[in-house]
Image (spheres, helix red, strand yellow):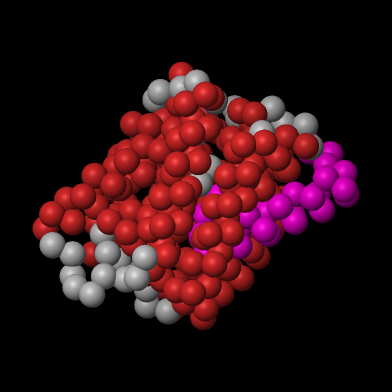
């Protein structure tokens, strides 16, 4: 599909921009990316593979803003990324065998938990050892969910990082972007090998996501906790509606 029409290209750029912005602040950008790719004629497998390019591009752009703001410490990244990626690899294995009837209530329940987690006041004290172990299990679970479903995994990670691990929401959001970047770098190789990445639309989508990710990253840094809370709640509601209607 190297002969994209102007209309299709504009739709993809717009979808990439919106998804990159959402993913940099909250998550669930896949609810924009997947319909755009299906609309231009890709099948679901190609859409699921091709959108990884846009997610990677948007996350890389957002990370530059987070790094300049000093939100990413090496120790935090090493604590969060390995268990999340390990869980994602495990979750990818049974992904094609889970019935849709199970996935819909799982998604809806998860979005509700996310909203509660990010609206809670930040903890007054440093999390105890028990909370850190719960955080580790939560990261494995979030990664598993990401490998299994993908859509909304950024919201799940925010709930784990801020809710279970007690990490300040703005820092948790930056770490979420690192983790989802790692997920999708690993997954992209699998989809490329399977021939499910259609590069022309994927790269156009990624162009929009680069701009959206940069804008979203700056907004998350400047707006702080309140902006992230607002966007997370809005993204969770939209993702829930899309889940019910699809």
Task: Give the vertical position of 24 relative to 111 (above or below).
Answer: below
Residue 12 is covered by the magenta coloring: yes
Image location (x, y in percent) of residue 41 = 77, 32
Residue 135 vs residue 23: left or right?
Answer: left
Residue 189 is covered by the magenta coloring: no
Residue 112 vs residue 70: left or right?
Answer: right
Residue in view at x 75 percent, y 56 percent: 14
Q: Report the predominant secondary structure element of the magenta stretch.
A: helix
Q: Nearer the viewer, residue 172 or 113?
A: 113
Task: Give the vertical position of 40 relative to 228 (above or below).
Answer: above
Q: Which residues are magenta?
A: 1-29
Q: Nearer the viewer, residue 155 or 92?
A: 155
Task: Give the vertical position of 76 relative to 239 (above or below).
Answer: below
Dividing the picture into quadrants, the one containing residue 67 is: bottom left
Image location (x, y in percent) of residue 223 = 52, 78
Dividing the picture into quadrants, the one containing residue 208 is: bottom right
């Amino acid at each position: 599909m190297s002969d994209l029409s102007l209309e299709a290209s504009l739709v993809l750029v717009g979808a990439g921009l919106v998804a990159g912005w959402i993913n940099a602040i909250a998550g669930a950008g896949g609810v924009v990316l997947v319909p755009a790719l299906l609309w231009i004629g890709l099948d679901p497998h190609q859409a699921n593979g091709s959108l990884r390019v846009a997610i990677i591009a948007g996350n890389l752009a957002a990370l530059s803003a987070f790094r300049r703001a000093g939100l990413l410490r090496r120790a935090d990244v090493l604590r969060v990324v390995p268990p999340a990626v390990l869980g994602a690899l495990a979750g990818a294995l049974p992904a094609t065998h889970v019935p849709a009837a199970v996935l819909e209530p799982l998604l809806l329940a998860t979005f509700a938990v996310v909203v509660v987690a990010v609206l809670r006041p930040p903890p007054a004290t440093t999390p105890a050892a028990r909370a850190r172990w719960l955080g580790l299990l939560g990261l494995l679970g979030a990664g598993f969910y990401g490998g299994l479903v993908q859509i909304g995994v950024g919201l799940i990670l925010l709930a784990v990082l801020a809710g279970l691990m007690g990490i300040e929401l703005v820092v948790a959001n930056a770490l979420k972007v690192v983790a989802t970047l790692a997920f999708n770098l690993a997954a992209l190789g699998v989809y490329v090998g399977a021939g499910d990445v259609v590069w022309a639309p994927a790269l156009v989508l990624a162009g929009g996501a680069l701009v959206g990710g940069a804008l979203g990253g700056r907004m998350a840094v400047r707006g702080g906790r309140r902006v992230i809370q607002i966007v997370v709640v809005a993204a969770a509601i939209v993702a829930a509606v899309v889940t019910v209607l699809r």
